[in-house]
Amino acid sequence: MDYQIPDLIRKKRDNNILSDSEINYLVQQYSKGSMPDYQMSAFLMAAYLNGLNDQESTSLTHAMLSSGSILDLTHIPGVKVDKHSTGGVGDKLSLIIAPIVASLGVSVPMVSGRGLGHTGGTLDKLESIPGFTVDLSLERYVKIVKKHGLVLMGQTIEMAPADKKMYALRDVTATVESVPLIAGSIMSKKLAEGIDALVLDVKYGSGAFMKTQTHAIELAQILVDIGQSFNKPTIAFITSMETPTGSAIGNWLEVLESIDVLKGNGPSDTIYQSTLLSGAMLYLAGTVASIEAGIKEAKNAISSGKAFQKFRDIVQAQGGDLNYIDNPNSRGIPKHCYTITSRNQGYITSLDAYQLGTLSVRLGAGRLQKEHNIDPLAGIILEKKIGEYVQKGETLMTLHTNKDLDIGELERCAFSSIEWGTFQAEPQPLISHILDKNGLRVYS
Ligand code: URA
C-alpha cells in the first residue's frame, strides 16, 4: 500500500498511532533512498516527542529488520545466544563473556558496536589487538561460528541497514535518547544475527544512556517484550553505571583486564557481572537448569583455563597476533603515563563514570565524531575504587596517553570525578533487577 509521507509524519506529530503497514512504509522508503533525510528527521522527532506504543515499537523493529536479511544459523546445532549491553565506561564484559559461554559449548554469534562519546565499544577494544579484524563477510562469520562457536564482529551492510542510516541521522538530530527508538535499533540488529535467545545488560547512571533506573527499566521492558514477540527468550539485567566497570578504561587496557579475568584474576565487580551474564546465557541455551548453575559453570570455565583458551582461539581465527596476548608487555606503553596522587584523605564515596569516560576520550581512548581515530594504548587505570580509604599522596589513578596534554587540566578532571567522605558509603547493588517473561524482580 502507498501512503503520502507527510500524512504519516502528521499522524505521529499529532500523537496518533501508526499502523504496522504505515511504519513499514516509512522505513522501507527511507532505506531504499526514496524518502529524504529531512522527512525521516521530522518523523524521528515526532516519535521522540510523542513516543511509540508497544505495537509501534515492535513494528519499527520488524521494519528495520526487514530492510536487510536475517542470518540463517539453523544449520549450526544448538541454541545460539548473544548478550548486548546498552553501553558504559570500562565495560569490557563482552570480551570475557563470549569466550566463557562458547567454551561451554554454546554458540555466541556476537555483533557489537564502536564507542561513541564517553562510552567504549567492543569493536575498538578488539581492534587494539594488532591484526584483529572485526570486518568479516557473512560467509566468514558463519564459518567462524561453526568452527569456534564464537565470532566477534561489527554490523554488516546486510544486517538491519535501515538502522544504520537512521542511527546516523538520530545522532545529528538530537533523537538518540528515545526509549522506543533505542529499543528498535538494538533489537533489529540483534535479531538479524540469527540468534535464538538474548541476554541484555541495560545500564543506568551517569555513564549510561539512561540516566535513571526508571528509564532503564522502561527500556528493558520494551526490549524484553520485543524479544518475546519474535519468539526469542530474552532476559534483561538492570545494572548501575554510576562508576566504571573494573579498573581499566581504554581499549588495550581493557583487553589486558579481560585477559586477567579470563585467567582467574581481575576486579571483583567485573568477575561478578561477567559470570552472572554468562550464567544467564547458559540458562537460556538450556545447558543448565538455573542462572545460579550457569554462574557455577562459568566460574569453572575460568578456573579450568577453557575460557582463556577459547579467547586465544578466536583472536587467532580473526587474525589477531597471539604474541600480544601471551606477552602483553610487547604492546609497549604510550608516551606519557601520568600518576594522579591524592591531596585528600578519606573514603572515596563516588567515582563518576561519565567524567572518567570523558577524561579517557580526552586522553585519546575514544572519539567524539564517528570519523575520529582512537589511540589503542590511551586510557586510565583506577588504582582506587569506591569504598576504599585513601591516604594523602597515594596514587588514585594513572593516565595513559600519547598526546602532549596539560597535566594540570588532566589533574583537575581526575579530581572532579571523585567525591570524598569520612565514612565508608553503603555499597549500592551493581545489578538491581532482572526482567524476563515473568516480569520484573529485584535481583539479589
Ligand atoms: N545502541 C544502539 O544500537 N542503538 C541506539 O539507538 C542506542 C544505543
Image (cartoon, grey):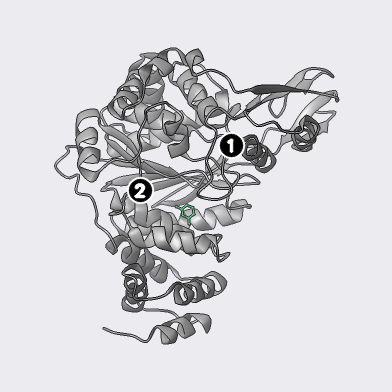
* 278 horizontally vs 365: left or right: left
Residue at the spot of label 2: 155
Quarter placement of the N terminus: bottom left
Whole-percent x, y for residue 122 in the image: 45, 38
- What residue sits 78% from the left and 36% below the top? 409
For residue 368, above or below residue 330: below
Whole-percent x, y for residue 53 in the image: 45, 71
**Farthest left residue in view:** 75
Toward the viewer: 336 or 258? Answer: 336
Displayed quadrant of residue 350: top right
Displayed quadrant of residue 66: bottom left
Toward the viewer: 385 or 408? Answer: 408
For residue 10, above or below residue 293: below
* 402 horizontally vs 165: left or right: right
* C-alpha span from label 2 to label 1: 29 Å
Label disc, if present, on residue 251 of the rendered structure: none
- What residue sits 62% from the left and 28% below the top? 402
**Residue 6 visible here:** yes
- What residue sits 36% from the left and 21% below the top? 321
Going by the numbered disc 1, the residue's amino acid type is: Leu
**Dot 1, how many residues are within 10 Å of its Cα: few (below 14), some (14-19), or many (20+)?**
some
Whole-percent x, y for residue 354 in the image: 66, 43
Displayed quadrant of residue 419: top right
* 129 horizontally vs 115: left or right: left
Q: Secondary structure at mark 1?
A: loop
Q: Is mark 2 within 8 Å of ligand 1?
A: no
Residue at the spot of label 1: 430
Going by the numbered disc 2, the residue's amino acid type is: Gln
